[in-house]
Image: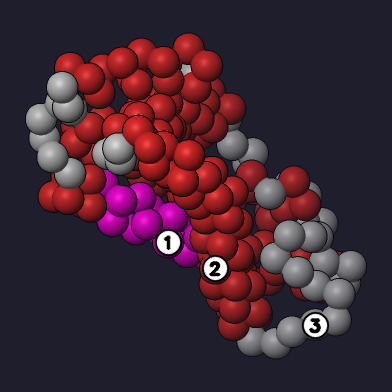
Amino acid sequence: FVIVLSPRAGALVARVGPRPLLTLGPLLMAVALMWFARVPAGSQPWTLNLGHPASYLPPPSYWVDILPGTVLFGLGISTLVSPLTATLMGSVPPEHGGVASAFNNAVSRVGPQLAGSAVFVAVSATFFSQLGRHPAGLSPLNRPVDPALVSEAAGASVTAFHLAMGICVGMLLVGALIALFGLNSRPRS
């Protein structure tokens, strides 16, 4: 999506201005993450067989649970990336283009890692608070070594995943609101 649609989205900024695209992109991405948040609990590979048939959780359907969210996220990021760069570079005089490009590059490299770190702190805190303890060697990312913890950890992991999706949706909605109310709606000449 990014390879095919980003150039078109960047060119569209010149005709419609940055506001519509920089609002639409995060909104599409937020809808995609809300779609992922509804993926069944059985999507964790280590929860597919918890030891007895009654505890079996059906795996997600790729076509219903994964593909629609992936397509929406791809459309959203394609609508966002190129127009964001075009808007940033178009907002500074040409003599400051190098500084603007460096700033854009630095933010695009550091921002996602900082946001991801904050989300993972929230995920870990939620996971362990759901368990009510912090067993050695257990993390929200791995199957517990102790078979007695598998079912409990699966529930805590699902709760933590829902929180992660909620935090990311919130950040995307804030970005969409900033674009909607903070950007000029007219294209630049």
Question: SS class of the residue under badge 2?
Answer: helix
Q: Quadrant of residue 150?
A: bottom right
Report crowding for label 2: few under 14, some 14 to 19, many 20 or more residues within 10 A (C-alpha). Answer: few
Q: Is residue 3 on the magenta stretch?
A: no
Q: Nearer the viewer, residue 174 or 44?
A: 174
Is residue 116 something that shows in the picture? no
Which residue carries the number 2 mark? 118
Question: Mark 1 vs mark 3: which is more N-terminal?
Answer: 3
Which residue carries the number 3 mark? 135
Report crowding for label 3: few under 14, some 14 to 19, many 20 or more residues within 10 A (C-alpha). Answer: few
Which residue carries the number 1 mark? 167
Residue at the (77%, 52%) spot, across then down: 46
Q: Dividing the image into 4 quarters, which one contains the C terminus?
A: top left
Region in magenta: 158-176
State the predominant SS element of the stretch in magenta: helix
Q: Are marks 2 and 1 in contact (CB under 8 Å)?
A: yes
**Percent x, y of residue 133:** 70, 87
Residue at the (30%, 40%) spot, across then down: 92
Mark 3: which amino acid?
A: Pro
